[in-house]
Structures are given as structure tokens and as C-alpha cells.
Image: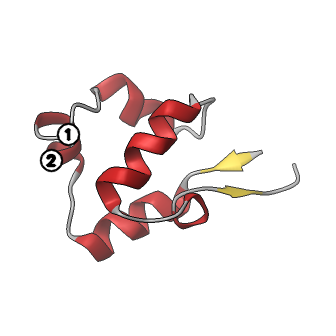
Amino acid sequence: MIRFDKLWKTMEKKNISTYQLREQCGIDSKTIRRLRANENMETKTLDKLCTILDCRLEDIAEFTKE
């Protein structure tokens, strides 16, 4: 399972809120809801998040065995 728990920590460290992701960066609220629920995510969305947060994929997502 891919988990996005690290995303919220990285956002906090970079001082970026979900409001900023929605309003300034074009990430819609459905996508944020899916990230919170650890649901499937398109790679283009992950790429956009890494660009916005200036980070690597492993800073926002991790694989864990179910």
C-alpha cells in the first residue's frame, strides 16, 4: 500500500497548507481527500506535488506491506 503520511509532515515543514495547495497551486479538494485516504494517485499529481513542495517522491509517499 502506498501511504501519504509523509506528505502532511513535508507540507508542515515547508509551511504549506491544504488551502494553499487548492487555491494557489491548483490541487483540487477531491485530490486532497484522496491523499488523506491513501487512495490511488496519478503520477502527474505526485509530480506536481513534488514540484510545489520542492521535494522528492519519498518525502511525500512511502510503500508499506499490508
Density class for disc 2 (Cα within 10 Å; few <14, some 14-19, many ≥20) is: few
Residue 23 vs 15, above or below: the answer is above
Give the residue type at disc 2. Gln
For the residue labelled by badge 2, is the local secondary structure a helix, a strand or a loop? helix
Q: Pick the residue in front: 17 or 51.
A: 51
Discs 2/1, front: 1
Instruction: Report if residue 13 is visible in the image.
Output: yes
Residue at 37% in and 36% down: 32
The number of numbered discs placed on residues in the rendered structure image is 2
Give the residue type at disc 1. Cys
64 left or right of 62?
Answer: right
Residue lying furthest bottom: 13
For the residue labelled by badge 1, is the local secondary structure a helix, a strand or a loop? loop
In contact (CB < 8 Å): disc 2 and disc 1:
yes
Q: Earlier in the sequence, mark 2 or mark 1?
A: 2
Q: Position of residue 22 (x, y in %)?
A: 20, 35
28 left or right of 15?
Answer: right
Q: Position of residue 29 (x, y in %)?
A: 29, 28
**Where on the picture, by quarter, is residue 8?**
bottom left
**Cα distance between the residues tagged 2 and 1:** 7 Å
42 left or right of 45?
Answer: right
Residue 41 vs 52, above or below: the answer is above
Instruction: Report if residue 36 is visible in the image.
Output: no
Residue at 43% in and 65% down: 55
Read off the residue under disc 1: 25
**Where on the picture, by quarter, is residue 17?**
bottom left
Residue at 54% in and 37% down: 37
Read off the residue under disc 2: 20
Q: Position of residue 28 (x, y in %)?
A: 28, 26
58 left or right of 32?
Answer: right
